[in-house]
Amino acid sequence: MKRGLIVLLIFFILTTSVSALQLTHDPIQNEALPGGQVSYNIHLINNEQMPLHIQIKTVDLNWLLEQGENSFSIPPDKSRAVVVTFSPLSNDRISPGNYGINIIIDTQTTRLERILPAKVVAFGDVLDVQFAEDPIIDPRRGAILRLTAKNNNQILLPSMNLELTSN
């Protein structure tokens, strides 16, 4: 009888601490060029009957958490969305490939760890550029060429300049 009561009590304590904070994440920009930043929207829901003091940090060796609102409180039964941004520790250490960024959410009652997926794309793999059809160029006449450029990844290129040169 005592053994069953102890197991029930331990089960109740574990389920209470696990459900105190719910964490989900959505990528905002999870693909980047070498040296670029990645960012995520972190959704936190406080299921506790008291305010939770939240601290967001990382122990990742390749990515640094940008200074922002990384420490705050959430009132009982409320939610909050926070944008977290990571920069590579060094441009030399981050080569193109897939990465997992380890993020830790600490409260006074729980500690949640998640791995956020990130992809670093090589510069040559970002755009697929080609002429729409085989152009016929006559040096004595003007020619209209149609060039298509397709962004193969989810990398924002707001200040991209496209320049055509001939040899």
Image: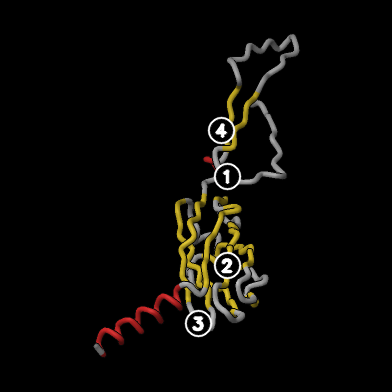
The mark that comes first in sequence, 1 or 4, is 4
Give the residue number, with chain letter if any, for mark 3. 109
The mark that comes first in sequence, 3 or 2, is 2
Q: In which quarter of the image is the C terminus?
A: top right
> Label 2 crowding class (10 Å Cα cut-off): few <14, some 14-19, many 20+?
some
Front residue of 110/6: it is 6
Question: Most extreme residue toward the bottom, as rendered?
Answer: 2
Q: Measuring 66% from the left and 13% from the top, which residue is drawn there? A: 137
From the viewer's perspective, is residue 29 above or below residue 109?
Answer: above
Q: Position of residue 83 (x, y in %)?
A: 64, 62
Q: Measuring 57% from the left and 72% from the top, which residue is drawn there? A: 46
Q: Which of marks 2 and 1 is in front?
A: 2
The mark that comes first in sequence, 4 or 3, is 3
At label 4, which amino acid type do we have?
Asp
Q: Position of residue 93 (x, y in %)?
A: 49, 61
Q: Which of marks 4 and 3 is in front?
A: 3
Tell me: 108 left or right of 9. right
In three-dimensional space, the C-alpha distance between marks 1 and 4, rounded to whole angstroms, equals 13 Å
Q: Is mark 3 on a helix, strand or loop?
A: loop
At label 1, which amino acid type do we have?
Gln
The mark that comes first in sequence, 4 or 2, is 2
In three-dimensional space, the C-alpha distance between marks 4 and 3, rounded to whole angstroms, equals 49 Å
> Tell me, what colour scheme is on the image?
secondary structure
In three-dimensional space, the C-alpha distance between marks 3 and 2, rounded to whole angstroms, equals 14 Å
Q: Where is residue 19 in the image (x, y as percent from the top left)?
A: 47, 72
